[in-house]
Amino acid sequence: MEATLENNYTYKDFESNQEVRWCPGCDDYVILRAMQKALPEMGVKKEDVVFISGIGCSSRFPYYMNTYGMHSIHGRAPAIATGTKLANPNLSVWVITGDGDSMAIGGNHFIHVLRRNINLNIILFNNEIYGLTKGQFSPTSTIGQKTKSSPYGNTQPPFSPGELALGAQARFFARIGGNTPKEMTQLFIEAEKFKGTSLIEVLQNCVIFNDGCYTKYTDKAIREDKQLFVEHGKPMVFGKNRDKGLVLNKLKLEVVTIGENGITEADILVHDAKEQDPTLHQMLVRLEYPLVTGIIRSHEELTFGERELAVTAQVQATSKYKKVDDLFFSGDTYQIKEDGVHYE
Amino acid sequence: MIQTKRTPEALEAVIIRFVGDSGDGMQLTGTQFSDTSAMFGNDIATFPNYPSEIRAPQGSLYGVSGFQVHIGSVEINTPGDEVDLLVAMNPAALKTNLHALKPGHTIIVDTDAFTKKNLEKAQYEINPLEDGSLANYRIIQVAMSSLTKEALKGIDGLDNKDITRTKNMFALGMVYFMYNRTTEHTIAFFNNKFKATPHIIEANTKVLNAGFYFAETLELIPNTYSISPAKMPAGTYRIIMGNKATAWGFLAAAEKAGLELFLGSYPITPASDILHELVKQRHFGVKSLQAEDEIAGITSAIGASFAGNLAITTTSGPGLALKGEAIGLAMIIETPLVIVNVQRGGPSTGLPTKTEQSDLLQALYGRNGESPVIVIAASTPANCFDMAYMAAKLTLEHMTPVILLTDGYIANGSAPWKVKSVHDLPEIKTTLLKQAVDGWHPYDRDADTLARKWVVPGTKGMEHRVGGLEKDKVTGNVSYVPENHEFMTKIRAEKVKRVENFIPALTTEFAASGDLLVVGWGGTYGSLHSAVKEMNHLGYKNIGYAHFNYINPLPKNTETVLKQFKKIVVCELNNGQFSSVLKMNFNALNLCQFNKIQGLPFGNSELIEMFKALVN
């Protein structure tokens, strides 16, 4: 995956010849372009990039990327990607999934890929609805949400993908609004750099079945006041006037105003994404005001692939078996010297 | 090393069953006897019988563990039905296994284990050794536990547990004497196994010898038996269990094809031993993932196949059901993948530890849409090696999934395997395209096999997408064109059909035409072959036997072969699944069925009786 001079890619190198078929105005277009722009910055060869998706609107994504790709079956992309990455650790492997695909039918694979911490990247398009099947509630739909399958309001409490991920020991979790392409592009680059499973939740607006579900956080007029974009090593300050910040008050995060009640910027919590203990990351994930975006957690440790390779190297270093025949002809073998066949 | 002094009576074959408590070491005892016999040159077949409880209460009826050994100077095809000698280490073992002993034959018991408590646990009201209920058998009563203790006096460092654990070697020593075997191999085994604990080597050796000498001086054993070496092709042999042979077949195929082997699997009885065997093989770079579920087992394998590994997944019936959708994906993206199904009794959880052949129709049809795959089946423990190898060869050369069916009976059974060198195995030519080719399209096909090329990530200039949506017949892009779907459906079927040009023709044994053709498939080979052979010896020369290892597609000459007989009986451990496949393909044939659905293999006598009824 070394960057070489010949790889002077632009986003156009990553556009496939397939016509993009998402609804006009869908955030998926933003994500697609952000990815096409991020890839040339990553220093990976085009032929080493693989996109693997499940089922749903988001999962059409691989068809639109001029890389290797597989549009697979519902919920299974993390397991397929695990096999691909184990088979060839040299590849840059990306899982494209949605809230139905990863939180419902693929929930098991989602938690286990995070637990194992194999070095691949997952982009979760969370639109809090089933789009492709035309508008049923999903595991991230809110209580009371009216959908085709919940005409009187949804009664199933939602998952928070970030909380679920951190509970499953995610080492990298980032969240980003679907209408902020510049930051999104940067997060994709950071996810690729991160050694381990990276999960990026994109708050993706579905213009048809759940339009505006994130407006209260993502509307351009208010988003600086409603969102806190965290950066490792920087104080957690937000607001149009950069005068709001987070402090820890007993066991809760609290929003304070800089300049009021003697609060200065020095009192504001500094974001430590690399901290091993996820307690504060969990609190950030749960916060509704402000909604925390950016890289919330980025704690590197040995990856599953590295552990696997280390064990294999250790076994190979001391093994007497180099070829399969060495095994077949070793141990409890015996000789039949006199040639014969059974009578019939 | 010690040897028998008496002049033994020669036997062609003998069946021995060692039974005792889970902790009595019956598997080890049986394995030692069969290994020693194999090295002596006998043909053998063995079958273990474990309780499903992991640590069942001592002395209980459901905690009995057994190991059956069939050895012969003649061809041995099955672990056998009724036994000639029963070695029972406690009352529960006697009670649960007596039914398998031939009338008039011998039982060896450890009388020390026939305590009031153990008799109660075995639900005996009166001690069967004293109430005359065993009058129809020859009983050799030995106070094995006390004799073992006695033999171990003077060896330091042994606790009670160590002493109890060696009494199985007393029994083995006795049986070695009775069947004119030497103790050499077993003593070598102790020296290797207990290297770190010399006192354990000494203890086991002493008890083994004590058992041997005790039998020699025992008046209850008036004569001993000998079973001469069998006639077998010369060469290097080893005893192999079916599951291990399956695992090794894939090791050989990966090396031959120049690929890394990837296993994605989820533990399930009776398939887990393939996983256990392959996780050990990191020396060869084998990658194995114990996945979070059956679906991740197969889908991780699909991911590995996409990236260029020889990818397999192993399971049993319920797992195959869970894998169905993913098999369809592998089929439509036309990527190599082997699915091993070690069949067990079904439906649902069914009979996990028992054998059955009831997943045939699931393997053939258990998926949505038109999704044919290659289906093949192994017939014996050693044949699992060949069929696993063949499964890998077919999937790599034809670019379509292969389901390999084995079953609990051959997977856990063991038999001699004439070791094959990878060098001597048939070539495997993958369709890998490692460099960019101008004008290449993902769904271009080979003119003979209709296989597409395998182009894996990392290949420069060949980037492409595959997926579960219907594909354009050339580019592989998504296509909803009606004619394209029909074309692709038919060509995928044709691709599987054409495999018939690359598999062996169907053959018959014993007769090529005549009154009755016995038809079997998969793991029943041993029982059916033996029974037809016996019929042949009894003078029924017009009975033939045809065994199928290839089920989809069927061998090209199937109908021609079957038509040479007046009657055909399809014998299966299910309710008639292969029979229905044959009827569907060859509706002019008049087929009889013989089905057994008891979680057990065919017994020899029931087959002979049925054959006779059909020809008389």
Image (cartoon, coloured by chain):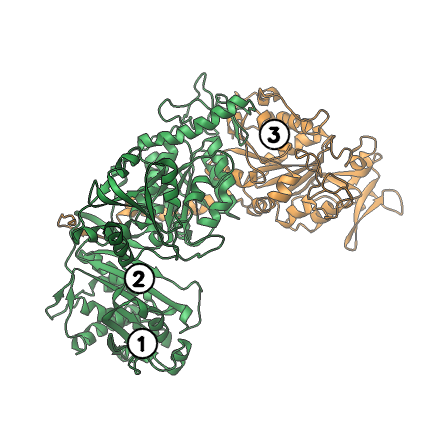
Chain colours: A orange, B green
Nearer-N-terminus badge (2/1):
1
Q: Determine the secondary structure under disc 3.
A: helix
Q: Which mark is residue B193?
A: 2
Q: Chain of mark 3?
A: A
What is the x, y in percent for residue B179? 18, 66
**Residue occupied by mark 1:** B156
Identify the residue at image location x=74%, y=47%: A286
Mark 1 on the same chain as mark 3: no
* Measured Cα–Cα span from mark 1 to mark 3: 72 Å
Position of B269 with respect to B69 (left or right) is right
Residue B153 in view (yes/no): no
Residue type at numbered disc 2: Lys
Q: Chain of mark 2?
A: B
What is the x, y in percent for residue B336? 42, 34
What is the x, y in percent for residue B5? 11, 70
* Measured Cα–Cα span from mark 2 to mark 3: 57 Å
Q: Nearer the viewer, residue A304 or A99?
A: A99
In terms of image quadrants, where is residue A62?
Answer: top right
Residue type at numbered disc 1: Asp
Mark 2 on the same chain as mark 1: yes
Q: Determine the secondary structure under disc 1.
A: loop
**Front: mark 1 or 3:** 3
Identify the residue at image location x=24%, y=65%: B187
Q: Nearer the viewer, residue A223 or B589?
A: B589
What is the x, y in percent for residue B119? 38, 79
* Measured Cα–Cα span from mark 2 to mark 1: 19 Å
**Residue occupied by mark 3:** A60
Identify the residue at image location x=73%, y=26%: A25
Q: Determine the secondary structure under disc 2.
A: helix
